[in-house]
Amino acid sequence: MDEFEISVLNPEDWVLYKIVRLKSLRDSPDSFGSTYEQEAVLSDAEWQLRLDLKSRALDALPLIVQIGDLPVGLAWGVVHKPDVATAHIYQMWVSPALRGKGIAISLLRAIKAWAIGQGCHLLALAVTTGNEDAVNLYTSSGFIATGQLEALRVGSTLCVQPMVMKLGSAL
């Protein structure tokens, strides 16, 4: 496999972000609270605003993974005020052809390091219960199931399991 590079998405990267986000939603529709249909109709201004963290007063780390110019992965770390002790992971996705190659672990490590730097004590996420590969990835990385199952999205029969990792643990 060619070397992959993880970088932080900046506001000027909105087109690249749009491409990989829509690709992830189309590829893995049962993994996200949003849908391809909901996000494909967003305006260019809305895509730009998502990466304008300062104007949104959002404490976040939007990451993209590329092999050359090809986007192959995505993940966001977000700290929601006022609960600054917990960082959340959203939009985690790796291209199916490259799963199991260390990309997801690298994304988790980058978000974990960022969260520790933010002074967080927990990392939190929610994973679709039927996605055994993702559940195994998070479990083997030190996440534990916590809380009740929740609906993936309104009207969905799929459920997600909230999971947390105490920072300073595995990975």
Image (cartoon, grey):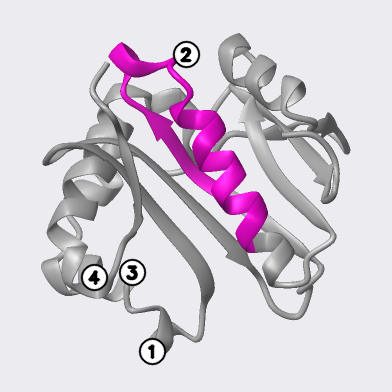
Q: Tell us which disc is closer to us: 2 or 4.
A: 2
Residue type at the position of mark 4: Glu
Q: Mark 4 points at which residue?
A: 46
Q: Residues within 10 Å of mark 1 (few under 14, many from 20)?
A: few
- For this view, does 8 lie left or right of residue 158? left
Mark 3–mark 1 contact, CB under 8 Å? Answer: no
Label 3 or label 1, whichever comes before in sequence order = 3
Mark 3–mark 2 contact, CB under 8 Å? Answer: no
Of the 4 image quadrants, the one containing the N terminus is top left
Does residue 116 sit above or below 158 in this rendering? below
Q: Disc 3 to disc 2, how far (Cα)?
A: 29 Å
- For this view, does 62 lie left or right of residue 107? left
Residue 100 circle label: 2
User: Where in the figure is residue 160, as x and y percent of width and height?
Assistant: 67, 30
Which residue is at a point 75% across and 37% down the rendered structure image? Answer: 162
Q: Name the residue under label 3.
A: 50
Residue 55 circle label: 1
Callout 3: SS: helix
Label 1 or label 2, whichever comes before in sequence order = 1
Does residue 76 sit above or below 52 in this rendering? above
Q: How crowded is mark 3: few (under 14 residues within 10 Å), some or many (20 or more)?
A: some
User: Where in the figure is residue 164, as x and y percent of width and height?
Assistant: 80, 42
Highlighted range, magenta: 90-114
Mark 4–mark 3 contact, CB under 8 Å? Answer: yes
Q: Disc 4 to disc 3, how far (Cα)?
A: 6 Å
Q: Tell us which disc is closer to us: 3 or 2.
A: 2
Q: Disc 3 to disc 1, how far (Cα)?
A: 10 Å
Label 3 or label 2, whichever comes before in sequence order = 3
